[in-house]
Amino acid sequence: MPRPPKWRRISSWPGALFFKPRAVPLSRLAINVITMDEYEALRLADVEGLDQARAAEMMGVSRATFGRILECAHRKVAEALVMGKAIQIEGGNYRIDGIAVFSCVDCGRTWSVPSGGGRPSGCPNCGSKNFSRTPYQPVPPVTGAPRVRPGMGPGRRRRGWRGGRRP
Ligand SMILES: [Zn+2]
């Protein structure tokens, strides 16, 4: 009997949700799926440089759990680099805390700012003022879903986090 998933707190949004080796057709690529909580672990440990105890506290998980999340994320990123796989950031047990997520209509960029800070002046990528706050809801993971899904293209990614909460 699997334990119920525990929400992990994330307080940033990826700069992009899909990364692909150049000049390889998507149909022939294997994709490593990095969950949002794994992305957040990478950011806190490797970009912000926090020690694991502090990073675990920020995500609301134990230090041991944080270590496992980070290790899994490292392996997926390293494997993608070594084997020429694409990386997709999607899913996981998480809730967004303390940020507002915006999407640019003109270039498709999605980004986050601290919540309560008002509307951004423009898209950080193209400067457009044609953007809107994403009606984001976290999506519970599909139990038993494979972590690696060859052939899963970026065009389908929005469904995961725009469709609202599943029952
Ligand atoms: Zn833009």
Image (cartoon, grey):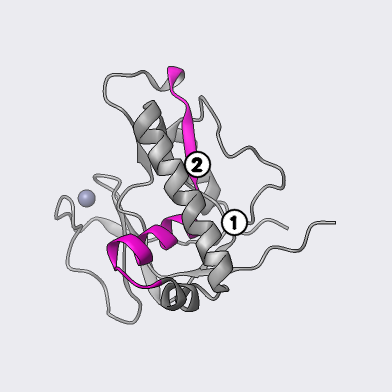
Q: Is residue 43 magenta?
A: yes
**Residue 122, image quadrant:** bottom left
Q: Is residue 29 magenta?
A: yes
**x, y percent for residue 78:** 39, 40
Which quarter of the image is occupied by the N terminus? bottom right
In the image as oriented, which residue stretches furthest toward the right? 1
Q: Amino acid at mark 1?
A: Val
| Vertical comparison of 119 with 28: above or below | below
User: Mark 2: is the Cβ under 8 angstroms from ligand 1?
Assistant: no
Q: Which residues are magenta?
A: 28-51
Q: Which mark is residue 139?
A: 1
**x, y percent for residue 36:** 48, 56
In this rendered view, identify the residue nearer to me: 164 or 93. Answer: 93
In this rendered view, identify the residue nearer to me: 37 or 48. Answer: 48
Dots 1, 2 in contact, CB < 8 A: no
Q: Amino acid at mark 2?
A: Val
Task: Report if residue 103 is visible in the image.
Answer: yes
Q: Which mark is residue 161?
A: none
SS class of the residue under badge 1?
A: loop
| Vertical comparison of 125 with 30: above or below | below
| Vertical comparison of 87 with 49: above or below | above
